[in-house]
Image (cartoon, grey):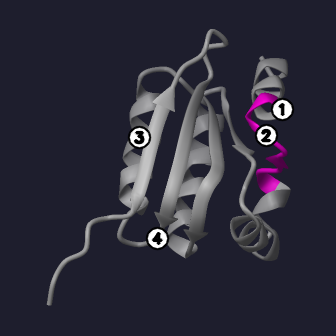
């Protein structure tokens, strides 16, 4: 039985606004969720509690990924920030909607809109 490499890419940028933007691509599942969670936790520990997740390249997300998002939004809000979702793919948007996560973390059309929401919430 061969092990496959985790199929998740997370790139972090911090524009002039100070809000961290995490571009997430690949598959967010039980094998990869810990990778995203580690990035989010590290950023919050560094004092960056306003976080934008660019989901435009995320092809798949299961309940493990949903749990990471839910824990991250609670953690960010506890530190005076928030979690903003940007441009979820249709498959990811569907799982967010059918699980009701969009009522807690409403998705934005793109990163620019999510950043504007984050900056307006200061």
Farthest-out residue, bottom: 1
Q: Nearer the viewer, residue 2 or 82?
A: 2
Which residue is found at the position 80% from the left and 50% from the top?
107
Residue that badge 4 annotates: 29
Secondary structure at numbered mark 4? loop
Residue 66 in sight: no
Q: Quadrant of residue 113?
A: top right
For the residues marked 3 and 2, what is the alpha-carbon distance in whole angstroms?
A: 21 Å
Label 2 crowd bin: few (<14), some (14–19), many (20+), radius 10 Å: some
Q: Which residues are magenta?
A: 104-112
Foreground disc of the pair 3, 2: 2
Label 1 crowd bin: few (<14), some (14–19), many (20+), radius 10 Å: some
Residue that badge 2 annotates: 110
Q: Mark 2 and mark 3 in contact (Cβ < 8 Å)?
A: no
26 displayed left or right of 76: left
Secondary structure at numbered mark 3? helix
Which residue is found at the position 78% from the left and 34% from the top?
114
Point out the tag, 2 or 4, that comes first from the N-terminus: 4
Does 77 lie within the magenta span?
A: no
Residue that badge 3 annotates: 39
Instruction: Indicate the position of residue 2 as horizontal and vertical percent values.
Output: 16, 83
Residue 101, compared with residue 113, is above or below; it is below
Q: Nearer the viewer, residue 89 or 33?
A: 89
Q: Mark 4 and mark 2 in contact (Cβ < 8 Å)?
A: no
Q: Mark 4 and mark 1 in contact (Cβ < 8 Å)?
A: no
Q: Mark 3 and mark 4 in contact (Cβ < 8 Å)?
A: no
């Amino acid at each position: 039985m061969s092990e496959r490499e985790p199929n998740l890419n997370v790139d972090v940028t911090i524009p002039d606004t100070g809000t961290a933007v995490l571009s997430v691509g690949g598959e967010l599942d039980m094998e990869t969720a810990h990778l995203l969670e580690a990035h989010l936790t590290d950023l919050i520990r560094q004092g960056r509690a306003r976080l934008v997740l660019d989901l435009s390249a995320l092809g798949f997300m299961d309940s493990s990924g949903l749990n990471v998002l839910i824990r991250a939004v609670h953690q960010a809000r506890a530190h005076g920030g928030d979690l903003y979702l940007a441009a979820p793919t249709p498959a990811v948007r569907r799982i967010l909607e059918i699980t009701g996560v969009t009522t807690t973390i409403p998705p934005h059309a793109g990163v620019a809109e999510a950043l504007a929401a984050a900056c307006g919430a200061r």
